[in-house]
Image (cartoon, rainbow, N blue to C red):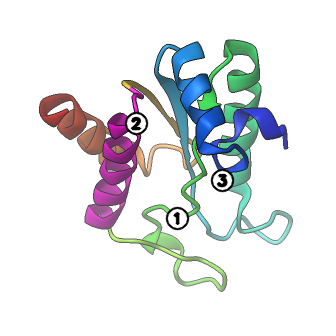
């Protein structure tokens, strides 16, 4: 994990400088914790999102917010290890992440989905709300 692109690894002073340097752009990786057969870990979707986010942030010179490890996964609850959050909770958490970061100067958000199509609608609602309110 490259320390210099991850928000949680920086001091607030470093974050302030990177916010300016990145022209207010930040990546928010959103994945899930759910079964992926017997051959993959339950964190696969988030791991994929964070790997893509880190590579993109490194190339673009922007920051990555801490990943959201949970998505809407009720269809996988039949198997152990799955943690599903309600769609409305995912919307609210994603929006709160955006609103918090907006308060500190970020104004361009890349919501990076690692959970296939399942999280997309909820992420779109959070993003649309942020566009209207912020």
Left or right: residue 9 compared with residue 130:
right
Q: Earlier in the sequence, mark 3 or mark 2?
A: 3
Name which residue lies at 62% across and 22% down: 62
Q: Which residue is mark 3?
A: 46
Q: Which residue is mark 2?
A: 104
Residue 27 pos. (x, y %):
55, 33
Name which residue lies at 73% across and 57% down: 44
Q: Residues within 10 Å of mark 2 (few under 14, many from 20)?
A: few
Q: Earlier in the sequence, mark 1 or mark 3?
A: 3
Secondary structure state at the residue bearing disc 2: loop
Name which residue lies at 53% across and 25% down: 19
Secondary structure state at the residue bearing disc 1: loop
Q: Is residue 105 magenta?
A: yes
The mark lying in front, picked from 1 and 2, is 2
Q: Magenta residues? A: 87-106
Distance Cα–Cα, label 1 vs label 2: 24 Å
Residue 54 pos. (x, y %):
73, 33
Distance Cα–Cα, label 1 vs label 3: 8 Å
Q: Is residue 87 visible?
A: yes
């Amino acid at each position: 994990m490259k320390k210099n692109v991850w928000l949680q690894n920086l001091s607030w002073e470093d974050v302030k400088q990177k916010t300016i340097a990145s022209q207010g752009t930040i990546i928010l990786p959103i994945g899930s914790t759910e079964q992926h057969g017997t051959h993959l870990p339950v964190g696969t979707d988030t791991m994929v999102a964070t790997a893509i986010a880190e590579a993109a942030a490194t190339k673009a010179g922007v920051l990555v917010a801490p990943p959201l490890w949970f998505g809407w996964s009720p269809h996988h609850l039949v198997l152990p290890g799955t943690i599903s959050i309600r769609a409305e909770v995912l919307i609210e958490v994603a929006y709160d992440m955006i609103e918090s970061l907006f308060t500190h100067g970020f104004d361009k958000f890349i919501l990076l989905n690692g959970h296939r199509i399942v999280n997309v609608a909820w992420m779109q609602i959070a993003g649309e709300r942020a566009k209207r309110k912020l």
